[in-house]
Amino acid sequence: MKNIQRILFIVMVSVLINSCSTDFLNLTPKDSISESAVWGDPNLVELFVNEMYRGLGHGHHEAELSSMVDESHFIHNYGTNQVVLSIITPSDIGQWNRGNQNAYRWSRVYGYIRNANMFMENIDDVPFEDEAWRERLKGEVYFLIAYYYHNLVRLHGGVPIVTKVYGLEDDYAVPRNSLKECVDYIVENADKAAAILPEVQEGANLGRANKGGALALKSRILLWAASDLVHENWYGSYEQPGLVTIGGDRTAAWTAAKKAAFDVMSLPVGYTLHDELGDPFQDYTDLFIHKSSSEHIFSRYFIKSSGWSDADNNMQSPLYNGPNGYAAWAGNTPIQALVDDYEMADGTRFDWNNPVHAAAPYENRDPRFYASILYDGAPWRQRPTSTAAFDPLNQISIRTVYKGNDTNSEVASYGVDTRQGPQQTWNGGYTGYYLRKTIDIAVDPEFTYSGAAPETPWVFFRLGEIYLNYAEACIELGEDAEAKTYLNMIRKRAGMPDITETGDALRERYRNERRIEMFNEQSRYFDVRRWLIGDQVYHNTKGIVINEFSDGRVEYSVHEVSQPRGWDDKTNLLPILQDEMNRNTTLIQNPLYQ
């Protein structure tokens, strides 16, 4: 390959212009850099690795994984409907093939894997004066390779392991590796990264891969590799079961998952749960807003003005997800099934059949509910001038107020944040809820489009997830007391009472705890599949209707919104796109898509 990608063009042109020389006018071509130039300059090699970090993606996109599982409803569709209806096909995988999901898209991820292989083929010949610099970059790329494959494998099962750079003259027909080989390859690269990288990255290297992140990635993939999804037959007859299952000793698999989580917890850096203030609501809120925390293991960082057209770098979550009454787009709106799974403050389940709960459904709930969900009456930031007159209290307004004592009477007002409200009705949500978690209240969504985007990080790995991974492995190994020790650490930070159950009841409490603690962190989609519970959770989308009458009564009723959902076992894994099957005839399609 004579030229490397255009990623370095702006940097190089800036350097050449600032040199006050006219020689740069003679570059041929002017929009790329020769391969020999890159591999001859350690600074350009680092820029090349920097570009590879884009392949990690993040979770602040317009359409999120939460809206492809039982967490939220993406009101603009963008192919999410095909996913939640389980009607995806090898020719149409809906939202999964759109730019918001670049970190998971087959062709995009293999593009980054190609760059990683190119790096590995050349790095030992780069003239570094500082060998520690070379080793650090190697460690980072080992981590990136492991991360790229962990995204592919969790979606598709076994995939081709590619370790060389293919040219135009090469045969691209590379078969899928077994699922076990893929998991082993991810673990191998994570271990290589952990052996090289520092425990934390600081200063100018903040945001680069670190040892904690590599070991956390290992923990996540080994938990997945111990799960029901890859050890039970959910697919019937299939010609190559090794592509989608691992088999073997489940106890050994859970033991490996437990050890991997413990290795993260044991790092000398001393990660701790974020409880700086001792206020469960504020600490859980700040955990996802602050740029640094003792709980963060590996995060991606942003600057305020990162451009509009670049899906990999874009960070405008307040605009994407804020209420329409705040001039925002109401994208990923929490659904009633999620809201109902937040426990009462005393640790009991919320129940619509309990008249006390039904009369005031947002009172006395888990503090994480208030930190994660914007509900009717929730306090929020100052309204924009366009709607300030309708809401002097700056509270989320979902209810319809009637002049009489029943719904046949005249409407006095519609909630400011509804589709019948005074602003951007086309952007109003359907469920009666909006996203609060990961949204910085200090950021005005009205101006994020014009460059005032927040600098809220995306936390890929944090100690809370590792505690949950460890607890799950302990439960499956029959070590209930150990599991509850770490589960209850999380609940203590959340201001919730201890879990005391054992056996199957403990497993159910754990799964709900993980659902709540990890909401909107790109975990639930994969958890539902690895636990094989899709048929239990993919039900038609529901939300809340709130009516207030002149006699002071307020009635809450659950209703279906305009998004039917359904389940098909085939969607435990995504199909390989037909275009990829056509390009590589050795590929075997996933089960139930033939």
Image (cartoon, grey):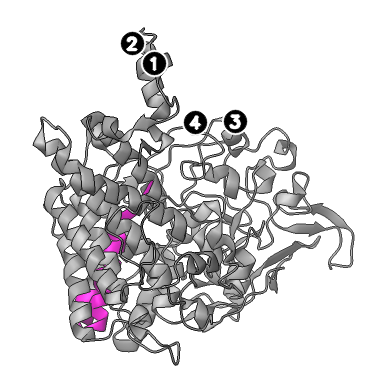
Q: Where is residue 288? Give x, y as percent.
A: 40, 48
Mark in front: 2 vs 1: 1
Region in magenta: 458-483
Q: Amino acid at mark 4?
A: Ser
Mark in front: 2 vs 3: 2
Q: Is residue 100 left or right of residue 418?
A: left
Q: Mark 3 and mark 2 in contact (Cβ < 8 Å)?
A: no
Secondary-structure class at tag 1: helix
Q: Nearer the viewer, residue 364 or 536?
A: 536
Tell me the tag on residue 450.
Answer: 3
Q: Quadrant of the C terminus?
A: bottom right
Tell me the tag on residue 305.
Answer: 4
User: Tag 2 or tag 4, which sits nearer the N-term?
Assistant: 2
Question: How far apart, in angstroms, are the residues tagged by discs 3 and 4?
Answer: 8 Å
User: Mark 2 sits on what residue?
Assistant: 19
Magenta segment includes 362: no
Vertically, is 112 above or below 440? below
Secondary-structure class at tag 3: helix
Q: Is residue 347 visible?
A: no
Question: How far apart, in angstroms, are the residues tagged by discs 2 and 3?
Answer: 33 Å
Tell me the tag on residue 24.
Answer: 1
Question: How far apart, in angstroms, are the residues tagged by discs 4 and 1?
Answer: 29 Å
Q: Amino acid at mark 2?
A: Ser
Question: How far apart, in angstroms, are the residues tagged by discs 2 and 1?
Answer: 9 Å
Magenta segment includes 463: yes
Q: Mark 1 and mark 2 in contact (Cβ < 8 Å)?
A: yes
Vertically, is 380 above or below 539? above
Question: How far apart, in angstroms, are the residues tagged by discs 4 and 2?
Answer: 27 Å
Q: Amino acid at mark 1?
A: Phe
